[in-house]
Each structure stands twice: as structure tokens, then as C-alpha cells.
Image (tube, coloured by chain):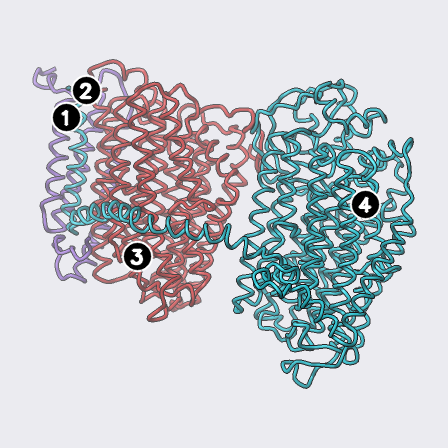
Amino acid sequence: MFDVRTLLILIPALPLAACVITALLGPRVLRSQSHWPAIVAIFGSFVCSALLGLEIYHRQAEPTDGASARDTLGGVEVIPAPLWTWAAIEGAYPWTAPSNWHEGSSERDFRISVVLRADALTAMMLVMVTFVATLVAIYSAGYMHGDAGYWRFFTYVSLFVFSMTMLVSVSNFLLLYVFWEAVGVCSYLLIGFWYQKPEAAAAGKKAFLVNRVGDFGFALGLFLIWTTYGTLDFHDSLANGDTDPVRVAQAREELQTGKTPADPSQRLTPGVLGQTLLETQDAGGRQMRRDWETILTGGQGPDTRSYVGGGVGLAICLLLLVGACGKSAQFPLHVWLPDAMEGPTPVSALIHAATMVTAGVYMIARCIPLFDASPEAQAVVAAIGGLTALLAALIALTQYDLKRVLAYSTISQLGYMFLAMGTATATGVAAGMFHLFTHAFFKALLFLGAGSVMHAMGGVIDMRRFSGLRHIMPTTYATFLIGSLALAGMAPFSGFFSKDAVIAAVYDRTHDGAYAGLYSVLMYSALLTALLTAFYTFRAFFMTFHGPQQIPAEAGHHAHESPASMTGPLLTLAVLAAIIGGVLFVTGSFTHFLGHTPSLAYLSGIAGHESAGGHHADHTWIAVVSFFIALIGIGVAAFLYLGDQREVQAISKELQLRQSPRLRGVSPYQLSAHKFYFDEIYDFLIVRPMRLFAQGTYWIDRHLVDGLVNLVGRIPPALGSVMRSLQMGLVQFYALAMVLGALILLAVRLWAAGR
Amino acid sequence: MVPLVAQITVSHYLVVGAVLFVTGAVCMATKRNILGVLMGVELVLNGANVNFIAFGSPFLREHHLGLDGQLIAVFVIVLAAAEAAVALAIALNFYNNHTTIDVDRAEDLKG
Amino acid sequence: MFSDTTTVWVLWPEIALAALAVWIYVGNALFRPKPNTQTRLGWTTFAAAAVAFAGFALYWHQGGAVWRQSLVLEGHGPLAIDYFAYAMRTVALLAGFLLVLQASRAGENELVSEYLGTLLLAIVGVMLTASANELIFLFLGLEMLSIPTYVLLFLGRRDGATAEATIKYFFLSVASSAMLLYGFGFLYGMAGSTSLTEIRAALETSSAADGGLMTMAPLALILVFAGLGFRIAAAPFHFYAPDVYQGATHANASLLSILPKIAGVVVFVRLVGVTMPALGDFAWQLAIVLSILTMTIGNVSALWQTNLRRLMAYSSIAHSGYMLIGLAVALAASPAEAATGGLSSVILYLFVYVFATLGAFAAFTYLGAKDREVNRIDELAGVAKTRPVAAAIIAVCMFSLSGIPPLAGFWGKLALFGNAIRLATNTESATLQWWFIVLAVVGVLNAAVAAAYYLRIVGVMYFRTADTALPSQGGWGAWSAAAAAAAMVLAVGVLPGRLFDNAQRAELAVKGIALPEGLSQADAPTSLAK
């Protein structure tokens, strides 16, 4: 239908072009019209993404006909768009294959080809990212209107969309890392967008530094992947970097029949995330692949190929997880996200709620075959996800900053996604991605709504300073309500279906298999989190929109509904937040679509095999329970925050444990209000010792090293001043020096020869 | 052959060339006047020329080497003439600026 | 030999360029409208077009044939038609093109045709030197460069400093030419031929035999070093450089730091690196001693300078010292080893040096005006604010010259020092190890010292505020020359692979080694030749 490769290249290219145009023309030419390149390009990018998604969907529906049969691997669609080779060092690494792999050791080339690949997972992320980005760009045109850095803002946003679309479409770990950093940079730039504000600058720095911790882990993971697998490509390619599906498929067939091509450049280099030999396995082979210990010790013949488990596999997964935790703000690296709310609100909506922070989830989903080989890693992912979800929800209970409440809810919802990834089952991953998808819409909606409130309130975001805004801002009110219902997991809004799917997926792991007990605990904690979520969401909602009308002084007299460019995106997102979960859930198309992703298809292959003889649990009770939990949460919030405030005060006083002043600091309320003292703990354990250490080394450097260096540094100038005196300006002397120089050289030669 | 001629070898010419060369170099290094220095240049170049001609001479070498030596000498003579022309222009320019053609007055640029 | 029309056929880009240069002289004299900016623009465009034409002629006519090594002269002709010569002619033309652009507003309007014509002839001189495989040709090529250079210096400006600079350059240059010629005399006498190929053969066959004329080989080598050392400004033949640069205009100083350097390095590579490796230990020891001396003198003296051109002169001296490292590697490596990387690193470094220096000088030219040049470093204060692009160009060039990683200069230094260390680690001989380790260490120390004064310039531009604004009337030509050079530096810095390949190919070609499989097929240009 369309040339998929062109679409795939256009998707990142358009925002990049917009970025360049805005950067060049913004300050002088475009000025207050700087939003146009970004909006047009990102919308174009969205159209391309949608077309790409449709195309992939169509190909899934009719997978085999002639030429495209080679593109598909048992219904798994991978469309490569090779661009150029970034680096190629031949024979860079004497690589030893894991013992169970059919191929022996060889010299592996270090070859980084810039290849974009489209599969279902990528297409889904692309659609989500570009759609939310389009709406946010339109919204920002209203929100940022009149800002001094108007063009700068849209330059950064375009750059971010470029980086994010590249992040989800590259097919190489190193490039993933590159764009991982690129989105980090954009995030840094946008958090500190109002760099004149010291809080914004500090928040940018904090985000950057905390992310470095994660990225360090990611980088180590990268190194370990390289030494273990001998390649960094996700997918198969030929040894000369060729990714043409037809030739790769030929090489694959040859490999499967045990032939080795004579020309070494035509040999197949299996990708890290494989898919090469998986589809040729029979059901029994697949089952054994899960049981990695058997394979590592057994050796299953020429075709057996698996992901590395054991200590190395666990290490890779955990290091990747560290990276994901940094980017997706999971415990213990979650501290940067709430502070990141210092950035402009559309940025919070786009980067710190809908898209960039989900990169960690995306990465784990992408690498799920690696996690599949390591049950311990799955358990860690799930535990971190569950713990973060609960922790963030607890903190969110007591925050008064509307955006911070939303930030903690984001962390909490990301925790749900991690929890889902931690199940490492096909349904779990699909549920996690489903939650990611719906979350993007309703969380962007909530942030944009909060931005609308903030816009009207003259920049005030403290919920104690305004209330009862429902009459002033009816559109924002209505859309925020829909977003809140979705976040609270109220049927039939989209959050209900996805959250329910996540909990159901966790429930499936509670029966048998490794760490079933842990998963049971996590499931109940997830249900508790759902209760808390419903509560704090509606607490914020009621405090903002209900109660007596109260407007802060900063808002002046013009507290009003936001302009159409802001309410338009709100309405669009509200419609989607309301229905998209239901539509996708009822039709089941999301899971089906996503299931065609190579790495996930592998999982569903296992699941299909298991479910053939296994049980298929009924999840209706979970849906019912979580519906009532949401209802209870909303009810409690309504009871406490609608009408009289006495109950709230009574309870918070009770929780303060006033009778014991010593314990006040650790009362539940204070713990929550102070975010469990994470910032303080990190400050005490890490920041201060580092600062002391830095001061010590600074002293040493200043007084010892510098002294020495200065001493040494005096030598060249001293020498220079001697040399200068030779340069006396007399041409005869210069001539003499030349002749004498030659004579001296000759004399030395004669002396040396005669010696 | 007259014995006196027969005893002259390439080495003798080389010595002549070397003497010319060194004389020229000394002249360049000691003369203050630009024209004097220019003469030194001519001497140095001709010292080299003597070598070339001696090396290329069919009478001094046992095997015939063609005309390369003589040819190079002719080229050098032409070059020297060209250089002298440029040198005079330069000297004139120097005179216009310094009202002298003593090169040791050219000492403003140093260090 | 000389009746062979192939010579003319090969040299026709040079011949055409010389003819066009003469046309610039004659044409201006014939028409001579009142000299004004228009005329000047016209002639500058003409000269630039002439250089571009010669470049394209060279590329389309000979590129492919040279690449395939299918163009061969019978016997040992006066020309070397190999990839090295071709590459160096190309570099000369590229640099020449930028020099023409750079000079678009320098100097007097009345003298524009003389200036440009002479500049083209100087470029022709470099190109002829690059092709020469014969002593006479070589010498004439060098003189073809020198004599126009005297004239150019003299045309640059008419004040005392220029007159002094011209006279110093002239006399010292002639003295060095004479020494070179004297050395050539001995080479000719030893080999009985002026052909470099035969000289090489003669040196190889009889270097072991004692007595006879061969004892003069070291003398010849010293004299050649003296003559060429002057061209590339290597110690102790470097004294002219600071004074002359200071007295010249920026345009002329850049010309002086580039064209003679290219010619000198070319001859060093072909005459010393390829023809005389048979001279044994003395050759490479001489190269090392001069290298250490040169770079140290250049760098430590530069620390004291306040005059911009004087500083650049010392920088130019120091870079010659670096380039001699590669020459020493080439001379010290056993002849049996095919490609030591010594010569290729020199070629690489030359390229990198030429464009970084050219970019800096062109930017200085741009920042000044005809009657008010940027002389002191302090005058650059605050340029980053007033002329951000020019400041960025200068900064890029300075960073490249000091060898900071993402830029071209880094790869040049990496190649040079890397090859020196590789030679030291691969050899059995303890002497060789010792010498080269010392050389590499001194080189690295020097690079560190050099960073001080390069970064000082950047610091002045970016961290100090201007007292008075610079005129910035050097014209679009100088600006675009600077930008093009800086772009080249950046491009090579980011993608050095192509340059490495070309340098290696040039080294193989100049040594007459057949190309290995991998290189022969790759990326042949599409041009053709009979």
C-alpha cells in the first residue's frame, strides 16, 4: 500500500527537519509563529505512524503472498530500513559462543548499522508518541504563548520527538543507548527550560544526574551483551551488515539446514533478540528453551539456540533494569521525576508522563526474551514495579501540588507497567504495553488539564490555594473528570481495562512457577495501590474543582477557561481516554496486534504451548473487585473532601501521632508528606559524602598537584625566553645560523663516523 | 694529454666549488649592503654549479653521463638572473622604506 | 625523454593554470579599466575559476588512471605519476583555491592582477614539485614556488615591516636554495643521474661499499635537510619564519605557512623518505634530532608571543617538527616492511595542518581590514560576541591544531605518535626503541605545551570583552575560505576513515608498492583516462 521504508524514515525525519528549521529561523524569522514547523511536522509524523501501523496490521492479516513471505517469519513482521553503517571494525572481538549454540567461536566484527525497523511494538509506540506529541504541540502553542523562549521550546520538542521516534525504531542496542541519551538531553533541556528559576535549573540537574546512574547500568549491560552475544543488533543480519530480508532469510535457511556459506561476509549474524531459529522449533524445543539450565548443560544439537541464562543472563537483565529504572523513575531512582515538574506543563505531559518515561518499559518489553531466560530477573522487575507503585501512591496521598500528585501517580502507574513486564508472560507484557498505551492518553490529559488550571491560576499549582473551579473552567473540569476516572480505574474508562489486565496477568503467575508467593504478594499490593490511586486522584480532583470557589491573587481578574488551542487537545484526549481502553479490550485487537512483535511472538509461542494443556483462569472476579476498589477509593475521597474538611483534619491529626513528639517525624502522615525522606536519605548517604570527598580532592589538587604542575609549567616558558633571545632580528645572523647548523650536523656526523 | 691536465680530477673541482660556496656564504653573512649579499648569493649558486659541471663532465668521469650537469647549470644561471631581478625590486622597496640598503637595518622584527 | 608528449599531457592542468595566470597579467594590462572593487571581484573570480578548472581537469583527466595505477611513463621520466603526486597536486589546488578566495580583498586594488597571477604561479610551483621525479625538475618546481612568493610578499603591503620581511625571506630562501642545490650536486655526482629512481637504486646498491663518492651521501643528506628544512621551517633553518610572518599580511602569512610547507613535505617524502632510506641510521637520527629541536623551539617560543602572526609562525614551526616524526619513522623502518605508516601519517598530518592553519588565517583576514590588520592576540577579545561565526571558525581551527579529539588535528597526531610508538614496540633494536620512545614522549609533551597558546587565543575570544570592535572587512571570500577550511577540519574529524585510506594509498604509491587487494577496488573515482 505504502512504501513502508519511506514512512519509517519520514517519521523521525520530519521532526528533525522541524527542529533544524525552528532552530535556524526561530529567533529571527518565525518568532511567535515558531510552533508551525513543529506542529506540522509532528502531525505529519503521526500520519506516517498511523499509516505504518495500518500497513503492518494489514500484513499481519494476510501474511504470506509471494515476496512478502520472506519478510514475514511465521507471521512476524519486521521491516528494516537500512540507512548507513555508523561504525565497522572488523574482527574487533574474539568471541566465544555460549556452549549450547551451534556455532563455534569466531571473530566478531564490531558493526553498528543504522537500521530502522518497524514491527508491531514499534508501530504502537510510534503512534502513541506522535499522537500525544501532536496534541501537546498544539496545546503548547496556546500554553507557551508569549514566552521569551517560544522558538526554543518548539526546537526542543521537535528534537525530543525525533529522538523518541528514533529510540523506538532503531534496532541496535548501541543506537538505543544513543537515543536513550538524546531523549535524556531533551528532557534535561526542557526541565530547565526556565533556567532563570533556580528550582528549574536544580531539577534539570537532578534529573540528569539520577539518570546517569541508570545509564551507567545500561552501559554496563550493553558491554555485557556485546561480550556475551558478540553483536548488539536486535535482529539478524549478514556479517557484512546487510539487512535485506530476502538475503537474511536465505542465510537463515542455509543455517537451519546446517550449511555454512563459503563467503564469510554472507554468514548470518544472529541478533541478540534472535527470532532467527525460534520459529523453526517444535513445541518441545520451545519448552526446553525456557528451561535454560537443561540447555546449558545438555546441548541440543545444531539448531538449538537460546538466550543466555544463569549468572550472566541475570546480570544483563539487572543492568538493563537499572537503566530502565532511571529513565522510568522506578524505585530507587524515582526521585527526579517529581522535581521534573518544574518544566513547562506540556513537557510534563509529553515527556514526563506519556512518552519518555515509558522508554524503560519499552526497553524491557523489547528485551523480554532475555528476561525470559532469567526468572530471578523477572521477579526483581515485578518486585520493583509493585513496590514503586505502592510507594508512589502512598506519597501521592498527601501532596498539595497538583502536578506533583500527578507525577507520583505517573511513577505509580509506571510501577504497574514494570509489574506487568515482570510477569514475562505474553499476556503480561501485552497488558503492560496496553497500560502504557492507555496511560499515555489519560495521563497526558490530566497533565494538560493541570496545565490549564495552572494557566488560569496565574502559575499557582498549590491545591490549597484554589478550589471550586468547576464553574470557571467547565471544559477543563469535564475532561479532568474523565481523566481522573480513567486513572482511578473506573469502568468503563480505559484505565480500568488496562489496570485490570495487569492485575490479571500477575494473578496468572501466582499459581505455580518460580516465585509464585512473591507474585501473590505483589498482586494484593497492586490491588491496594489501586485503592490508593482512586483515592488520591479524586482527592486532587475534589480539592481543585469542588468546594467553595477560591482563586489565588496571582490569577488576577482573568481567571477563565483556556483558549481553544488548549481545550481542543483536552477534548480529543478525553474522548480517547474514555473509550480507547474499552474498544481495544473488547475487540482484543491490541493484544493480537502486539503479539506479532518478534520477541513477544516468541513468548506467545510458549504461552500457546502451555495453554494447550494448561488452565485458562477466569479473571472476571478481578475485574469486579477492582471496580469496587475504585468505587471505594472515590467514595472515601468524596466523603473526606467534599463538603466539610473536619474529617480530613481529624484523620491527619490522628496520623501525626501527636502524643509522642519524638515519633512525629516518622508518623505515617509525615512519611508520606516527606516522600519517605528519600531526598534526605540520598543527600545524607550520597550527596554529602561525595561533596566532602570532592572538597578533599579539590584541596589536594589545589595545593599539591597544582603546585607541582605550576613548577613544571614554568619550564616551557623559561625555555621559550631563552629561544627568543636567539631570534635577534638580524638576517645575517639567521643565514649564519643556517649554515652553522648544517656544519654542526656535519661535524657530528663525522665525529660519529670516526668514533 | 698534457700531464698537468691529466692530474686534475673531480675532487679538485669539488674543492673549487666548496671554496666558492663558503666564500659566498661568508659574504652573505658579513656584507651589510644588499648588493653585496646578492653577490654572495651568486657565488654560492655558482659553487654548486661548478660541482654539477664537474660531475657531469665527460672528461672527468669514466662513463659518459649525458648533458644533465651542464643543463642544470644553465638552468641555475637563468634562475639566478631571475632572482637578481626580483632582488633589485625588493632592494628598491627596502630603500623606499628605510632610505638605506643596509640589511642590518632590518631588525625591527624580532623576538 | 623530453620529447615524450606524455609529460605535457600529464602536466596540462599546470600548464593551463600557468597560462591563465599569464592571462591575468596580460589581460589586466590590456584592458586596465580604472582599478576598483569591481575589477578586483572580476579577477578574483577569474583566478578562483582558473584554480577550480585546473582541479577539475586534474580530477577528470587523471584521477581514475592514477587510482588504477594505469598511467605509466616509459623509463624513468622526469615525472612521477602516482597517487601521491596526484593527491598532493589536489591538496595544492584545494589550498590554492581557498588562498585565492582569502585574498579577495587583501592588498591594493591596483595590484590585484599581479597578486592573483603570481599566486596562481606559486600554486603551479607546488604542483610541479609534487610531480617531480627528477632533480632538475624538482629544483625548478621549488624555485617556481619561491620566486612568486618573494613577489607576493612584496605586493602585500608597502611599509617598512613588509619590506624587511621580504628582504629577510628573500635572502634566507636563496641561501637555502643554494644549499639544496649544492646537495643536489652531490646526489647527482654519486648516482650519475638526476632521476630519483636511479639515485635510489644507486644508493641502495653501493651504500654498503665504502669509499668513493658514496661517502658524500651524508653531506648531501644534510644539505637537503638544510634546503628543505627552510621550506617547512624546521630548526635551525626556521629563524626567518616569525619575522617574516609578522611583517607580512595575514593573506601572505597563510600562504607562507601553507604552500612552501606542502612543497617541502612533498620533497621530503619523495626525496628523503623514499629515495634515501638506504643511508642507514644517520638519516633517521638526523630526522629525530631536528624533529625534537623543531617542535620544542616552536612550541616554547610561541608561549611568549603577543603578535598573532608571530604566534602562528611558531605554531607552523612546531607542526613541522611533528611532521618530521613521521619522516623519521619512514626512514628508520626496515626497507623490507612495505607500509610503515610513517609517510602516510606525514601526508595525513600535512592535510590536517594545511586546512586548520588556512582556516585560522582566513578568519583573521576576514576580521581585519586592508589597512588595519588584526595584529595582536588581544585584539581578538570579545570576537565571540561580535563575530560569533568567525570566532567559532578560529576556535575549531585552534582546537584542531592543538589536537583535541573530535577534530582533524587529533587524527593527525594520533597517526604520527601512534606510528612512532608502533615502530618502537615492533623493533628488536634497543637503540631504535629508545630513540622513538623519547621522540613520542617529547612529541606528546610538546602537544600539551602547544595547547596552552592555542587555547589562549580561544580564551581571549570567548572570555574577554572587546575594547574596540574589529573592522571585519576581509570580505566574503575570506569568510567563505575560513568556513570551508573549518568545515573540512570538522568533516575530517568526524569521518577520518577516507583520509586515512587516501594517505595510506599515497604512501604505497610513492613507494611503488602494489596496492593490496582491499584498497585497489574500493571507491575508484569515476573519471577516465586513455
Q: Chain of mark 4?
A: A
In this rendering, the answer to whether A464 lies above or below C375 is below
Does any portion of residue A37 appear in the rendered image? no
> Residue at label 3?
C308
Q: Chain of mark 2?
A: B
Q: Mark 2 = which residue?
A: B60
What is the crowding at mark 2: few (fewer than 14 residues within 10 Å), some, or many (at least 20)? Answer: some
- Amino acid tagged 2: Leu
- Front-most of residues C528 and A732: A732
- Name which residue type carries label 3: Leu
Q: Dot 3 falls on which chain?
A: C
Q: Which mark is residue A430?
A: 4
Mark 2 vs mark 1: give the one in front. Answer: 1
- Give above or below for A188 relative to A274: below
Pointers 2 and 1 in contact (C-beta within 8 Å):
yes
**Do discs 4 and 3 share a chain?**
no
Dot 1 amino acid type: Tyr
Check disc 4 and give the amino acid type: Ala
